[in-house]
Image (spheres, rainbow, N blue to C red):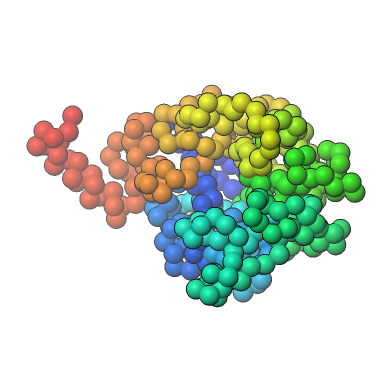
Amino acid sequence: MSSLFEPLKIRDMELANRVCVSPMSQYAAREGYSNDWHFAHLSRFALGGAGLIFTEATAVRREARRTHGDLGLWEDAQIEPLQRITAFLKSQGAAAGVQLAHAGRKASERRPWHGETPVNEEDMRLREEAPWQALAPTAEPYGEGWPESKAMTADDIEDVIEAFGAAARRADAAGFDVIEVYAAHGFLLHQFYSPLCNTREDNWGGSYEGRARLSLEVAEAIRREWPAGKPLFFRLSAIDWVEGGWTIDDTIRLARDLKARGVDLIDCSSGGIGGPHPLPRFPLGPAFQAALAADVRTGAEMATMAVGFIWQAKVANQVIADGQADLVALARELLNDPNWTLHAAAELGVDTDHSLWKPEFGWWLNKRERVMRKLGLRD
């Protein structure tokens, strides 16, 4: 059996293979509600054999969205449309995951095809989409030309912690099997733990303990609402790649502290907060961040997921076989080929007769294969 296709159990969640569909924002929601687009987008990965499928970053508060098109779980009415999606994913043998998020100072942004700039008067005129106030550890704007953020008060921070817990309760009601907290790529929790942008001088900043506090209290709040049998993941930026920023040693320390609070797996990405003195990065290439996942897996003695530039079946399999990570996450390659998991199974010799395909597809494809072999068109 190929390592990529070995089953995996985390708490009560059983995965058929190690392929995870990484969260991919679609910017297609209206007031946070999922719709037919999200159903079609996610369902094709279940038909394509992926073991675990995550929604896009799903806001825990209305103002936690990055754009007007983001999914949300800030109110109970948003549960029912998601139940349709989770029911179908699970009926096809996949596990259903939701990524809970707060954009922090990255909030109130236009959809990327409208220009990755702040929501402005044009959006109000053309789409009736108004800007809103972004929250952050301090008042600095996201970037040049962006409005100032609101420096969060202690009450604001407590509200966010409570919102993550409430969203976890709704995620359970919606039928999700696993939650991932988006604490990477310059979103709010990353803004708090990175010394590059958290210059607060109260109990929510300063030392490691102060900067990590929000992530740890979010984990605790979710665990209070989330069933004990269901796993909890965190996506972290394992290194900022900027002098004076967050380091891999910091990540290992945070991973250990999260593990003690009921977190089961660290999804290891990197970057997302810039600075004036960038550090050399790993060469950009296949599975270039898998080494970070390996460091965390060894250092924190917990499960990890590797993500980033993974598109080749042999590379994905090797990441698992070498013990660098327990899962591999793919995103844009699965947009390009929703059946990537099934094609990988064929390439790795796991499925030679389309038996892993849904019979509605596999029967026809196997019949075509037999005909092509008979005609000498296949080796």
Q: Kindly identify the residue that appears in the image at 66 percent across and 40 percent down.
A: 274
Depth check: 247 or 298 in front?
247
Q: Residue furthest front?
A: 145
Q: Residue furthest left?
A: 375
Q: Is residue 81 above or below residue 25?
A: below
Give the image location of residue 361, x and y in percent.
29, 52
Q: Is residue 320 above or below residue 170?
A: above
Query: Does residue 202 appear in this view?
Result: yes
Q: Is residue 220 left or right of residue 16?
A: right
Give the image location of residue 295, x and y in percent.
65, 27
Give the image location of residue 70, x and y in percent.
57, 62
Depth check: 330 or 229 in front?
330
Q: Is residue 276 left or right of residue 46?
A: right
Query: Does residue 158 appear in this view?
Result: no
Displayed quadrant of residue 194: top right
Q: Kindly identify the residue that appears in the image at 53 percent across and 26 percent down.
A: 283
Q: Is residue 213 left or right of residue 266?
A: right
Q: Kindly identify the residue that appears in the image at 40 percent across and 55 percent down.
A: 44
Depth check: 228 or 136 in front?
136
Give the image location of residue 278, x and y in percent.
65, 31
Displayed quadrant of residue 123: bottom right
Quadrant in which the C terminus appears: top left
Quadrant in which the N terminus appears: top left
Displayed quadrant of residue 197: top right
Q: Residue furthest right?
A: 202
Q: Kindly identify the residue that appears in the image at 63 percent across and 68 percent down.
A: 131
Q: How many marks?
A: 0
Depth check: 240 or 253 in front?
240
